[in-house]
């Protein structure tokens, strides 16, 4: 066997990451760069995309930021043009763009019957359609070159629907299902060397879910946050760095015979029955 460390070699690969300006996406973008990939950081806001790209360059990596709404096909096509112009091809796509909205979340003040249908649609479009269209746009080069790797970011909600967030849960379940579908489609229609997998993070404290897990005034865990910890065998929330090892495995030759899977990164949450 060759040096086992070489199995994780992605030196010189080109990676595109949507949602790369976020708390989780930013860590993944930096990790890809530290592993030797050239990274196109896509984020809704130019400031966050530029901030992550600049931090990569300061550390000696190659990166540039692109402001792009993944719900806008034309914007994604322009982003693809910039990536091709700058790096020439695309080897890795990480779809980390996503999120939820309070208007699509049930609460004591907002019943299921009063949820804003447009807000729910927006959540679904951001998480699922943003992933599907991104795979169409950036996966096209992979289909032509007959090689590449796609990693979608699903969620624990894709495995076990959670209370209060029906649109987000449905969208992430769709992402997981689509990941399996696309893995088969790419392998059979284009090349077995195109792999498609997903990561399903458990509970990570981000700006998008902070209002559900912590009290805005005290910073202490809400009853929901405390219940999550009680049902997580490892007894803590995830740290963004907890995603890096699985990501590097999925985008490297180390997982050359792995496609169509959804990997839980959840501290054991999905395995715990409560007793």
Image (spheres, helix red, strand yellow):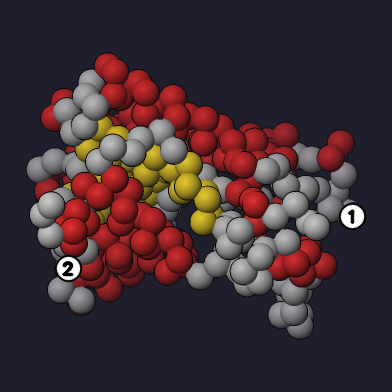
Residue 185, located in which quarter of the rendered image? top left
Residue toward you, 268 or 15: 268
- Please tell me whether residue 91 is drawn above or below residue 40 in the rendered image: above
Instruction: Please name the residue shown 12% across and 48% down the image.
Output: 87
Residue 61: mark in rendering = 2
Q: Secondary structure at mark 1?
A: loop
Outermost residue, front side: 1
Q: Residue at x 15, y 73 (%)?
A: 60
Circle number at residue 99: none
Who's the residue at 25% across and 50% down the image?
A: 254
Which of 152 and 87 lies nearest the eye of the viewer? 152
Secondary-structure class at tag 2: loop
Is tag 1's residue or tag 2's residue first in the polypeptide sequence? 2
172 is higher (above) or lower (below) than 144: below
Picture quarter with the C terminus: bottom right
The reply to whether discs 1 and 2 touch (Cβ–Cβ < 8 Å) is no
Which residue was labeled with disc 1? Answer: 108
Q: Is residue 118 above or below residue 269?
A: above
């Amino acid at each position: 066997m060759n040096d086992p460390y070489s199995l994780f070699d992605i030196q010189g690969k080109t990676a595109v990451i949507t949602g790369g300006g976020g708390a989780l996406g930013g860590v993944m973008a930096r990790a890809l760069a530290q592993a030797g990939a050239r990274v196109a950081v896509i984020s809704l806001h130019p400031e966050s995309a530029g901030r992550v790209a600049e931090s990569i360059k300061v550390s000696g990596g190659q990166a540039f930021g692109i402001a792009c709404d993944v719900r806008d096909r034309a914007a994604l096509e322009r982003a693809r043009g910039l990536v091709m112009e700058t790096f020439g091809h695309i080897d890795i796509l990480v779809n980390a763009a996503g999120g939820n909205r309070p208007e699509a979340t049930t609460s004591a003040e907002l019943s299921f019957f009063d949820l804003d249908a447009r807000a729910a649609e927006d959540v679904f479009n951001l998480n699922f359609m943003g992933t599907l269209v991104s795979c169409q746009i950036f996966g096209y080069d992979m289909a032509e070159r007959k090689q590449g790797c796609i990693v979608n970011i699903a969620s624990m909600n894709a495995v076990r629907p959670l209370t209060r967030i029906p649109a987000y849960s449905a969208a992430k379940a769709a992402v997981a299902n689509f990941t399996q579908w696309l893995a088969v489609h790419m392998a059979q229609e284009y090349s077995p060397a195109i792999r498609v997998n997903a990561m399903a993070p458990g509970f990570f404290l981000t700006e998008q879910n902070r209002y559900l897990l912590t009290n805005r005034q005290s910073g202490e865990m809400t009853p929901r946050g405390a219940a999550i910890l009680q049902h997580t065998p490892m007894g803590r929330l995830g740290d963004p760095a907890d995603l890096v090892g699985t990501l590097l495995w999925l985008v490297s030759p180390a997982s050359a015979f792995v496609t169509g899977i959804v990997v839980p990164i959840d501290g054991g949450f999905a395995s715990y029955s409560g007793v």
